Amino acid sequence: MKAKVLVRPKEGILDPQGEAVANALRHLGFEVADARVGRLVELQVESASLAEANEAVARMCDQLLANPLIETCEFEVTE
Amino acid sequence: MEVRPRIAVVTFPGSNDDGDAAWALGALGSEAVPVWHEQPDLPDVAAVVLPGGFSYGDYLRCGAIGRLAPVMRSVEAFAGEGGLGLGICNGFLLLCEAGLLPGVLRRNASLRFVCRDVRVRVERDDTPFTSRCTVGQELVIPVKNGEGCYVRPEGLDPDQIVLRYAEGENPSGAEDDIAGVCNAAGNVFGLMPHPEHAVDPLLGSADGGLLLASLVDAARDRVAAAA
């Protein structure tokens, strides 16, 4: 099964990388009010069922992929 | 002769301050014991130091992969039993990712790598890492990091803040000017500045030696108490 995990800086957390990207885009002439930079993790998961895969990916987010203090984690599992 | 307590210095792939840390600990009266990250067990030591540098390329987040190294399970057990643990820079990040210290460190607000001496203020002198200092004392110690912006968890006990950057010195945008924190029990401490680079006046400052010598004192006390 395939999983897409989207890790994003939490709202309210300063994202200097996003600010730098927004500034660079403005330099290129784009009107950008704000940018936030996160991370996309694509996984191939060995799993017997969708439910089991969902549960495993949720634990992966908790244990490694995101730090809940500064990041949020959303994911989608497909067969 | 005074006892030279044994202090482990762990080397991860990418550590680059392990040599300086071992040298400084030796110069300050302890015996530094090199430990490789793949070792599952810690040798018989009175304290553990996780030095600065990098760990496993710092993929994902600094320290996120490094904290899964075999040795870290032993470090966690050692600290859990009240053992003395010190994390410097990347070692601080590792301790945070491992959950041994509160908070997390992010990219510097400036997005620039910072390498310079900073003044830090001692907020507590009753820890095993600051016993040779006094509250309010300012120490000059270099920082060199790209990811030193400390983010504290909600409800962090202010008593856990051991070092703060002096006014106007914050090099990374760290919240509340925090440069170093300890765990609730006070036996684990992490800081972004590098005390091991400031143990000889020839190199500009010996203030870092006060922190490391405090640790050596505490380690020596532990050895004496166990004897």
Image: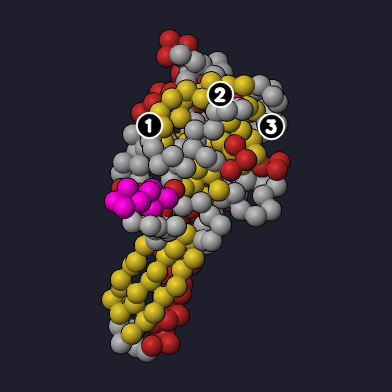
What percent of the width, then of the height, locates residue B158?
70, 43
Image: A20 above or below B16: below
Give the camera-side residue of A8 and B124. Answer: A8
Q: Quadrant of the N terminus of chain B?
A: top right
Evaluate whether label 1 is on the same chain as label 2. Answer: yes
Tell me the SS state at disc 1: loop
Q: Is residue B111 above or below residue B205?
A: below
Label 3 and label 1: CA atoms lie apart by: 25 Å
Tell me where residue A23 appears, x and y as whole percent: 38, 48
Res B63 visible: no
Label number found at residue B119: 2
Q: Which residue is mark 1?
A: B17
SS of the residue under disc 3? loop
Query: What kind of residue is marked 3?
Result: Arg
Badge 3 or badge 1: first in the primary sequence: 1
Q: Position of residue A77 (x, y in %)?
A: 37, 82
Question: The disc numbered 1 marks a residue on which chain?
Answer: B
